[in-house]
Amino acid sequence: MLINVQKEIVHATMKRPPVKNENSHDFFIGYDEQDTPFLLLPTTPGLLLDDECYGISFQRDACNPYKYHLDTHIVPVNLNSIRMFIDHLAFFFGPDHNMLNCYLESSSYQAYVSWSNKKQEEVIRETLLKYGAVSSVDEKKKYSELLAQLLKN
């Protein structure tokens, strides 16, 4: 199925730490089951479930049905609930992804990058504490795998 291949491409591209100098060509839009488009954001592995990425929904302009605005809330998006992925961003962001480039340079996106880095550090600390507190081999393996995922970035 094409959607499964698209999901794997999106997963491989977006499950990475966000960086301050992003390339707008590395982004995707996903439509959920209610036909809401989401800009999918790079998400550090280990911060969400494996099939989730952070995203921002697009809100349709009340006066112009062909115009969209990015919402202000970043939310977890389950990639399994996305029915279509697209990488042709010009419809939403204009030629050469000009509006996406502006967003990626904005204080909002830069704050997301900083928050993501701090959250990764926090999850690493919490996981190390949990690893030290358990004695079961299975539990230690679970935390060890999570640490490996968090630290490989």
Image (tube, rainbow, N blue to C red):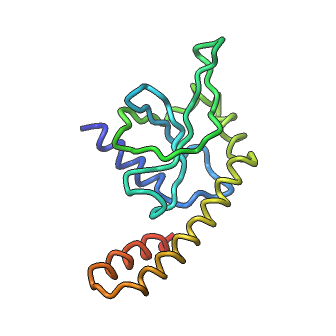
Identify the residue at horizontal 61%, vertical 44% (top origin): 24
Q: Quadrant of the N terminus?
A: top left
Frontmost residue, 83 versus 23: 83
Residue 38, compared with residue 109, is above or below; it is above
Name, please, the residue furthest toward the top. Answer: 63
Name, please, the residue furthest toward the right. Answer: 107
Residue 78, compared with residue 143, is above or below; it is above
Frontmost residue, 19 versus 35: 35
Residue 60: x %, y % from top left: 58, 21
Residue 43, compared with residue 125, is above or below; it is above
Residue 72: x %, y % from top left: 65, 38
Identify the residue at horizontal 45%, vertical 57% (top origin): 48
Identify the residue at horizontal 47%, vertical 50% (top origin): 53
Q: Quadrant of residue 32?
A: top left
Residue 71: x %, y % from top left: 62, 34
Frontmost residue, 95 versus 112: 112
Residue 87: x %, y % from top left: 48, 36
Residue 104, compared with residue 133, is above or below; it is above
Number of on-image labels: 0
Frontmost residue, 139 versus 101: 139
